[in-house]
Image (cartoon, coloured by chain):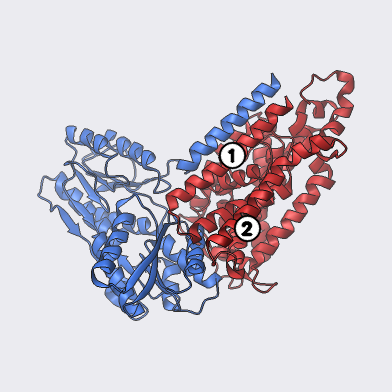
Chain colours: A red, B blue
Amino acid sequence: MSTPQQPGETTTVIQQAVNEDTDKRDVAGFLKRQLQQSLAFGTLVVLLIFFSIASPNFFTFSNIATVLLSTAVIGILALGTTFVIITGGIDLSLGTGMALCAVMTGVFVTNMGLPVWVGILGGIATGVLMGLVNGLNVTFLRLPPFIATLAMMMIAGGLALVISGVAPIYFSTSAPDFKKIALGVLIPGIPNAVLITAVLAIIAAIVLSKTLLGRYTFAIGSNEEATRLSGVNTRRWTIFIYMFAGAFTGIAGIIIASRLDSAQPQIGTGYELQAIAAVIIGGTSLLGGRGSILGTVIGALIMSVLVNGLRILSIQTEWQNVVVGVVVLLAVFLDSLRNRQRT
Amino acid sequence: MRFGKKTAFAALVAASALVMAGCAGGGGDVIEEGGGTDGGSGDGEMYIALVSKGFQHQFWQAVKKGAEQKAEELGVKITFEGPAAETEIAQQLEMLTAAIDKNPDAIAYAALDPEACVAPLDQAKSKDIPVVYFDAPCNGDVGLSLSATDSKVAGALAAEKMAELIGGEGEVAIVGHSQINSTGVERRDGFVDKIEADYPDIKIVDIQYGDGDHLKSADIAKAMIAAYPDLKGIYGTNEGSAIGVVNAVNELNLEKGKITIIGFDSGAAQINAIKDGTMAGAITQDPIGIGEQVVQAAYDAANGDSVEEFYDTGSYWYDAKNIEDEDIAAVLYE
């Protein structure tokens, strides 16, 4: 993809771009591409073994449920933003956007007294709308995604405070069952938020690998110009991708609101960076064109296993941040190393 | 060329993400009160600029309410602003500098960091603007007065209640909200010192910090409960930390009262947890009283009257038994 393209070749470019991640005939290349993902999986296993040996209280059913539940919110944000990052974009509005979605759900359910399902749809719609605005800014206004979503991060954070009146919106009286969305248990011992995250991961994986949206996500990230020249309306698809990711932001907002049984308008700051870190640890490239949902799931699990394990071992909070930072750094380093090999 | 640009962009993103991880926060959020902000000089009405540690938490909203009440009573104009998060030290300093530039009749300030504010406040001194502190003071000799809760006394009170409730022995842990700012440090130290001095059979097994983030604090408390199966009590040092601990116990479906939870400040969620028995009780400050007292002190200082160095606005224990009492209900906020 780094070779110059002749006009006549453009029709095959998309296919090349798509095949790049699925072509298994080139064994060495395939192994190289899978390197980071298998490294990530290996890291996860090593962490699990290490913490299990270090503390008898780590690998218990209850604590593993804790780890999985703590993965839910960041994990859902990471699933959506995997698509955006594969296109070569970035979304910094995830964290405060999630708070705004939670607040909108609270407004619909508690302040307006509408049924919970309307609140859920309203929260998701808020996320999709933010995705639409992000997408329009990135495509038609040609703003770099970093700047467009940075602005959206501030706007969403501000609106969450304004709309909520700088106070939490509680669900305990308006919808006593609201907390069961995340904390109810369909499978004994496993909170529903974990199931929802798993289902969303499967949906995201199918969309990314089996649908047009997924194929264009890779194509735009690999070579947007060539994709456009071969007749794909890349602007429209980029907007769709941001909207699709926005739906995940909305769902994350509902999950966090349900877990806290309230919409906390100031929450979410910094969550976008944890989600982006999870995506990158999972082997999705910041340069775009390459990534996987399985990787993101593993990346999110690494983050929460690491943090939970360090807490179980009573490691000081300061050092926990250092360790997580080093892991992110290693992941980005591996990514850049691989890109150097490709050029 | 294309590739080079993309690489550069990716590097920018990665670098910015790392920088921002350290200081993530919103923009400048300002709440204006009482009309214009063009300063007190000229229009005859006294103007006091309050720069707070924040405004999003219910605690700061209660301080603001107290300040507004007193301002109305005294017939002065105030502004009340604070950064989006209590980690935003630099942003708060900008607000402080901007407030000084407006030449108010007095400045009331709550320091996020006791050192960083020294230089801007010297500027206020050189302009002869009297400065009073609330909640947390700045180092140096500029401030005339501090209106605050004695946080060490409050932390010690929490320790006494914890000891009483768990029977004077066993393991306890602390979910703190900050290892930097003075309230976080003093509420922790007051608790730790008291336990070490008076209760040799109580062991503090873990202290971790969740920045007052409900979700993070919940995950921390769950890890503590997993790591120390014999844990008898957890002390959460502010509203968000305490609610996090309550959520943790609820999510783990622990029997109410199995772990003695002591919180700090109030807010609807904490009040409900105390009423339903999940939380044993909490220490409350008098945030409305802090707001009233600091505006009074600023007013006196601006008029050249003498002010006291420290106004302890008090801290109180409340639990299911006394939560409805008149003097307790007066200092709680929903």
Where's residue B314, x and y in %? Answer: 23, 64
Helix, strand or loop at disc 1? helix
**Which residue is under mark 1?**
A330
- Asked if the residue at tag 1 contacts the one at tag 2, i.e. Cβ–Cβ closer than 8 Å, the answer is no
**Left or right for B320, reference A190:** left
The number of numbered discs placed on residues in the rendered structure image is 2
Q: Front-most of B42 and A143? A: A143
| Residue B131 visible in the picture | yes
Amino acid type of the residue that numbered disc 2 sits on in the rendered structure: Ala
Q: Front-most of B210 and B172? A: B172
Where's residue B333, x and y in %? Answer: 37, 65
Q: Quadrant of the C terminus of chain A?
A: top right
Q: Residue at x 64, y 39 (%)?
A: A134
For mark 1, name the chain. A
| Residue A245 visible in the picture | no
Q: Residue furthest front?
A: A53
Where's residue A185, x and y in %? Answer: 66, 72
**Which residue is under mark 2?**
A72
**Left or right for A292, reference B136:** right
Where's residue B43, x and y in %? Answer: 24, 38
**Left or right for B139, reference B165:** left
Picture quarter containing residue A235? Answer: top right
Q: Single out the mark in the foreground, 2 or 1.
A: 1
Mark 1 closeness class: few <14, some 14–19, many ≥20 residues within 10 Å? some
For mark 2, name the chain. A
Q: Residue at x 65, y 54 (%)?
A: A45
Amino acid type of the residue that numbered disc 1 sits on in the rendered structure: Leu
Helix, strand or loop at disc 2? helix
Q: Using the numbered discs, state the Cα–Cα distance from disc 2 to disc 1 in whole angstroms.
A: 24 Å
